[in-house]
Amino acid sequence: MIRVALCAFNARYTHTNLAVRSLAAYAGVWFRHKRLLKYNWLYKLPGKLTRHINLSGKRSSEFLTIPKVSLIWREWTINDHLLALLQQLDCENADVYAFSLYIWNSALVRTLTVELKKIRPCSVIIWGGPEASTRARQIMEHEPAVDYVLCGEGEAALTELLAALTGQLRPDPGTLACLPGLAWRSDDCGDVVINANAPLLGGDDWPFAYSDTDLQRDRDRVLYYESSRGCPFNCSYCLSSLDRTVRFRSLDKVQDELDRFIAAGVRQVKLVDRTFNCQPDRAARIWKYLIERYRSMPYRTNFHFEIAGDLLDDEALEILQTAPPGLLQFEIGVQSANPAVLQTVNRKCDLARLASQVGKLRKAGNIHIHLDLIAGLPGETSALFGQSFDFVNQLRPHQLQLGFLKVLPGTQIRKTAQELGYLWMDDAPYEVLQSDAMSFADLCRLKQIELLLDYYPNSSQYRADAWLCRQWPEPWAYYNKLADDFAASGLFDQALGPEERLRHLYDFAVDSDRLTDCQVQMFLDLMRTDFMFSGQKSLPEWLSFWELSQDRQDKIILRDLRLQAERAGNRQKRQKLRFDRIRFSWALYCKTGELTKAVWLMVYDCSEGRPVLVGHGPFADGLPVRPDGDA
């Protein structure tokens, strides 16, 4: 019997790894069919009890010995301590360790592999995944601790390799030469041999990666799912361009499997289809199914899709506009708003149609939208990137994701980058350091702007930032000016909390000389609403909370408001209510996003977690009239 450990290292604990689960499920079915395996995986979480799960998803009270193969899979994060990881790997007492490599974990896996081989020199170590597949020869030549690399799709390749290893841990060259997708060393001279990849699986050939027990256990983590593999497009920077044979899972099977996520109450499912709506009719039918199922019985699960905005047709939009808020989330790759730049990377996109269709989605307001840009594409200067930045901002995404070009091994862009004199990191993540049109300093400025985006608009907590941005002619000019201010104050070298972010934004607004005195007052009040909604408990003096006023008339009004709340039946909440007075119309702001001079009362309920706005209305002669809320 051999013991096999499939190992994954995720970026965060909330993430999960689809690859090791799919590999375990596929191999488990195969070995069970061959009567070599009774129990197909073992799952552990740090600090929790080991759980043994069989193919039917039922727990076993003990781990049974298996005639030929004991197959387990494990997940950790890249933030776990090295020695603790090494100890846990050693405790698995495995004969074979298989690691799934990506750009975010390859450095850790390499270190672990080197040290693990010292401790367990007789173990067989296998690397697979996208980061290993494209560098198989280099790995086999320079990483002696690695015994085998699997290239391409891994389910069939790994299963056949494990079947060979059940006979002997060091199969003869004749056997190895017949295994698909395998990179190995010849015994005679140590030359690296790379076999042809395994045939691609059909859309219904890879198994569903989760048992019912998995779904229940991991329902609060992000689970990944693929309803198709491959991509029909040829973007030169993407590894998916190497697999342009798109294989679609049958709709009946997709619907059944989505039902399993829903039935388990999974929080979020991210579909990893490279362009989910590359076949628009099929995508629309799946969206319609999810929406109609929710209508018949509401459920918790949110579904995230990567789509092409210009491929959204009017029929799909009509369906999507009926989706309940929170059900669907879209990530749409714009990458650049410059057609010539897109052409250099073989990316086809009708930008006008993308803007029109995304605009309709945004107007409906029921789907969370992420729009992506890539910095460092060939021919895109800082000025041109600024135009792309403004183009995407005008579409008002809920999140603008600013990414940086990765010059990945095996992609077409690597050859282009070499020809154009690019500089990039030698090791993963292979990020661009200098393009043909942007210097290292230009890219560092974009890194600063990326941080500002994460601080303010992408956090969804700072309405004040969005309003202030509109006081500049273009968002690109605003964020560059804000970055100048942060850099001059050394703020990019500090970790800023919610209050500090607001304070520096306020100082920047005042120093900009773009606001009148009246606008400064209204802006401060808007920042105060941001601070309240963020759930902060303190009342910083600089934010000028009304409840901190020392004015005698203000104190009388506040006392009367609390008495009114008590008489209205809110005795228990009296001490949990916060009252504030702002100098703009909250109703008009919520409708138009503009600050219009007025005096309004705001009433917040702080009894449970984040404050909730339970009442608001205008003041007249210092007294509240016509409250629009329940307070």
Image (tube, rainbow, N blue to C red):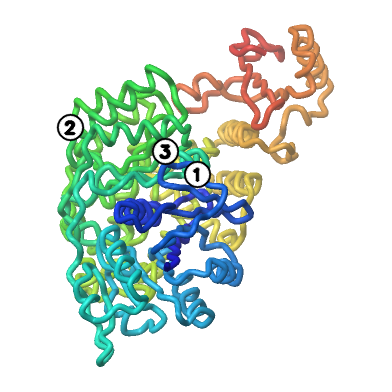
Amino acid type, residue under disc 2 in the picture: Asp
Q: Residue at x 63, y 16 (%)?
A: 615
Indicate left or right for 416 with 75 as reference. Answer: left
Q: Residue at x 24, y 87 (%)?
A: 191
Image quadrant where residue 85 sits: bottom right
Quadrant (top left, top right, bottom left, bottom right) of the C terminus = top right
Amino acid type, residue under disc 3 in the picture: His
Q: Secondary structure at mark 2?
A: helix
**Where is residue 463 shown, x and y percent of the image?**
52, 35
Image quadrant where residue 68 sits: bottom left
* Residue 398 - label: 3
Q: Secondary structure at mark 1?
A: loop
Indicate left or right for 555 with 325 as reference. Answer: right
Circle 2 residues within 10 Å: few <14, some 14–19, many ≥20: few
Q: Secondary structure at mark 3?
A: loop
Dot 2 or dot 1: first in sequence order is: 1
Whether residue 213 is situated above or below residue 31 in the rendered picture: above
Marks 2/1: CA distance?
Answer: 30 Å
* Residue 98 - label: none
Amino acid type, residue under disc 1 in the picture: Arg
Residue to which mark 1 is pinned: 221
* Residue 281 - label: 2
**Where is residue 212 shown, x and y percent of the image?**
45, 38
Q: Can residue 445 be seen at all in this image of the molecule?
A: no
